[in-house]
Image (cartoon, helix red, strand yellow):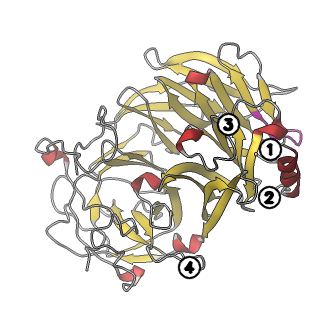
Amino acid sequence: MPPLPPVAFATLAHQQPGRPYITGITPTSLSGHLILQHPDPVLTIADAQTLAPVERLTGHTGPVTAVTCEEGSIWSSAKDATVVRWDERSRRAATTIKAFIRKPLPVTALAVSESDHLVVGGTELVSSEAHILFWDTRNASEPAYRHSSTHSDDITHLSILPPTSSFQVSPARQLPQRLLLSTATDGCVALSDLRQTDEEEAVQAEENWNQSIAAAGSYAYEGRLKIWARSDMDFVAAWGVGADPDDGELQLQDFAEISSAQFKYRDFELPRAGPSVVAPVGSERAYPDRLRSDYLIDVCPSLGVNNRGLPIVGVGSNDGNIVIQHASAFSTRENRPYHPSAYFVSEPGARGHKDVVRCMYHAVRDEALYTGSEDGVLAGWSLASLPRLWTGNPAIDDDGGDGREDVASDDEDDESEIETEESESDKSDNSDDMEVDEGPRHGPVYGGRGRNDRQDKRREKRHAPY
């Protein structure tokens, strides 16, 4: 029988001045900083090691909607119809791009490719149009081109996918070099040619989930590219990027949907004590006998993917506790149960969150998980000192199988260990188990172990607003 989910306390936690909601955490690409997003015009720069605020970025006049860091630059979009590039040294706006087509357009999603001199912004639905705007950074006074019919409602996510050579799906057809992933509250998930100005030619694949999409992303699984999406109702979906068996056209296929019932309003029993359950710095403190999940925080495939290609997720309680969950190794098309991989507890006496957790970021190299909550707390959790998280993939999990399907999810318990501030200095840097390129570590804990036919198909799939 494999070990059951470990219980961990926050390694570090810092409440930001003024207790602002933390709705997003983005790492800078060069310095050891985290950019904290709030539901207002201000961004906070926090130190990734101490979690303390370093500086505030002020310049937007409307709520910030997205942040991305690219080649040493910090970019943000906001509902004030601007995209800003920040100078991290001076902490001032270095470039301001205005989203304006007949009227200002609130920008709700953002992607940047510095090497392509390209900034891509997605807008709210204004005058019956939701635009994807493409600016050349060398002349950004107006968009170089735009796609205005891919989506029919507010755009919620934009990201530039890895080079298509890394996931070429059909030797019969050459894909564009780079693809743009876009999602919206209309339920549409689209892959478009980043450099194609003709929108009918640009869209390479699309599917409609029929759920309002709140967030999305991509990840690799067994040499293929996968797309995930999270809905406003806390459902999760995943697609594989593949080829149509008849004509070789790009497709989103192998659709899998996980109901919110796997994430919300579930009860979990925690172990009472054990040699590997370590309290935060100070004296031993009690932690809850049971946790009840109230919402889905986010999808985090970098933490693990099961043998069906379904990613790990984080769920939370209204009082700030977190459960990391994996999909069962025995998932089927009809049944995709999720089980706990770890419990991150913050109450009643432990440091950490005491309110709804709004965001999470996995720092792979640092083997740390950062979380932010509505009470303004930024917390860091050591993964290095925990047993390997269960993923639901027998090729990775220690016992060659999930090993938990005979245990009721509401009654699972386990023991774990996590470094505290007092013992961090004694921990050595050992990342032999990490299959990533080494780079600078900044976290609170170091170490650890397709033309006409395609247009016809698109018209058949045309969607109405969700």
Amino acid residing under circle 4: Asn
Magenta segment: does it hold 125? yes
Q: Which disc, if any, is residue 192? A: none
Q: Name the residue: 46% across, 65% down.
A: 317
Residue 182 percent across, percent down from the top left: 68, 44
Tag 1 residue: 150
Tag 3 residue: 176
Q: Which disc, if any, is residue 335? A: 4
User: Which contiguous range is marked in magenta?
Assistant: 124-132
What SS does tag 1 mark?
loop
Report the Cα–Cα distance between label 4 and label 2: 26 Å
- Which badge, 1 or 4, comes first in the chain's sequence? 1
Amino acid residing under circle 3: Pro
- Which badge, 4 or 3, comes first in the chain's sequence? 3
- Which badge, 2 or 3, comes first in the chain's sequence? 3
CB contact under 8 Å: marks 2 and 1: no
